[in-house]
């Protein structure tokens, strides 16, 4: 009886080991699924960030001084002509805008800037005065229109509508519009960011 019991015990152990071995051999392999080849997938691009900037356009003064201090006694860092665009950092405060000029913080008298908000990637048409050192900027598209001021050669304007009337470009002026003869404006395309930073 003892031998039979021992034999039965050994047989049971062998069967358990056999089942365990078979279970390990037939363990399910992980599924790979129908994933596309890595070379067929395209990386996701980060969404482009749209940024805005306060832009100051020089609207008065043939030549405007940019100073290192908010004072007419401050040293002149640079000068700009009418139509130049500057990034406005803050202001106006005590009659001065804080601007960025060549990477430095500087100041421009608030009387000479018209400030508005723009998208940096906004495409614009820029008109540069050429062919004359005294071009009339008029209130209406006519040689009889009221003269708002006289622009000098190389002054720049953002063109709202090219050839808005026969022989006239409509340009931005102090939040409104004015007109310059097509004969005296050379047009180019750029973005606000390119005009400000040369990007």
Image: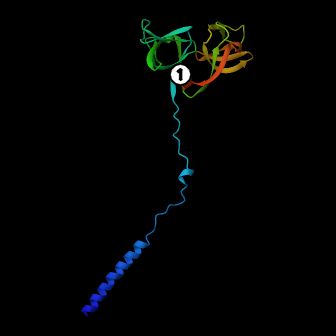
Give the image location of residue 46, x and y in percent.
51, 40
Q: Which residue is drawn at 60% across and 24% down?
A: 190
Q: In which quarter of the image is residue 6?
A: bottom left
Q: Which residue is drawn at 69% across and 20% down?
A: 162
Q: How many marks?
A: 1
Q: Residue furthest left?
A: 2
Which residue position holds label 1? 196
Q: Residue furthest bottom?
A: 1
* Colour setting: rainbow
Q: Which of 172 and 45 is in front in this view?
A: 45
Q: In this view, does 125 lie above or below 155?
A: below
Q: In this view, does 71 lie above or below 29?
A: above
Q: In this view, does 93 lie to the left or right of 180?
A: left
Q: Is residue 123 above or below residue 32?
A: above
Query: Where is the N terminus found, in terms of image quarters?
Result: bottom left
Query: Where is the C terminus found, in terms of image quarters?
Result: top right
Q: Is residue 148 left or right of residue 92?
A: right
Q: Residue furthest right?
A: 166
Q: Is residue 197 left or right of residue 71?
A: right
Give the image location of residue 129, x and y in percent.
64, 13
Q: In this view, does 93 lie to the left or right of 163?
A: left
Q: In this view, does 99 lie above or below 74?
A: below
Q: Nearer the viewer, residue 132 or 171?
A: 132
Give the image location of residue 123, x and y in percent.
60, 27
Q: Residue at x 60, y 12 (%)?
A: 155
Q: Which residue is drawn at 44% across and 18% down?
A: 104
Q: In which quarter of the image is residue 15?
A: bottom left
Q: Residues within 10 Å of mark 1 (few under 14, many from 20)?
A: some
Q: Which of 2 and 39 is in front in this view?
A: 39
Give the image location of residue 110, x and y in percent.
49, 12
Question: Helix, strand, or loop for circle 1?
Answer: helix
């Amino acid at each position: 009886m003892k031998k039979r019991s021992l034999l039965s015990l050994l047989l049971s152990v062998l069967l358990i080991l056999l089942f365990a071995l078979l279970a390990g051999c037939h363990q399910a392999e992980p599924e790979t699924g129908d994933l596309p080849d890595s070379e067929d997938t395209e990386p996701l691009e980060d969404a482009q960030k749209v940024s805005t900037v306060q832009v100051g356009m020089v609207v008065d003064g043939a030549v405007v001084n940019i100073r290192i201090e908010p004072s007419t006694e401050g040293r002149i860092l640079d000068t700009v002509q009418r139509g130049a665009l500057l990034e406005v950092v803050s202001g106006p405060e005590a009659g001065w805008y804080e601007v960025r000029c060549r990477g430095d913080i500087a100041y421009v008298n608030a009387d000479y800037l018209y400030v508005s908000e723009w998208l940096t990637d906004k495409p614009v048409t820029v008109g540069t005065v050429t062919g004359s050192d005294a071009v009339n900027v008029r209130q209406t598209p006519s040689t009889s229109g009221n003269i708002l001021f006289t622009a000098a050669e190389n002054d720049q304007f953002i063109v709202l509508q090219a050839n808005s009337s026969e022989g006239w470009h409509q340009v931005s002026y102090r939040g409104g519009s004015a007109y310059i003869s097509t004969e005296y404006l050379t047009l180019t395309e750029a973005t606000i960011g390119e005009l400000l930073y040369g990007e």
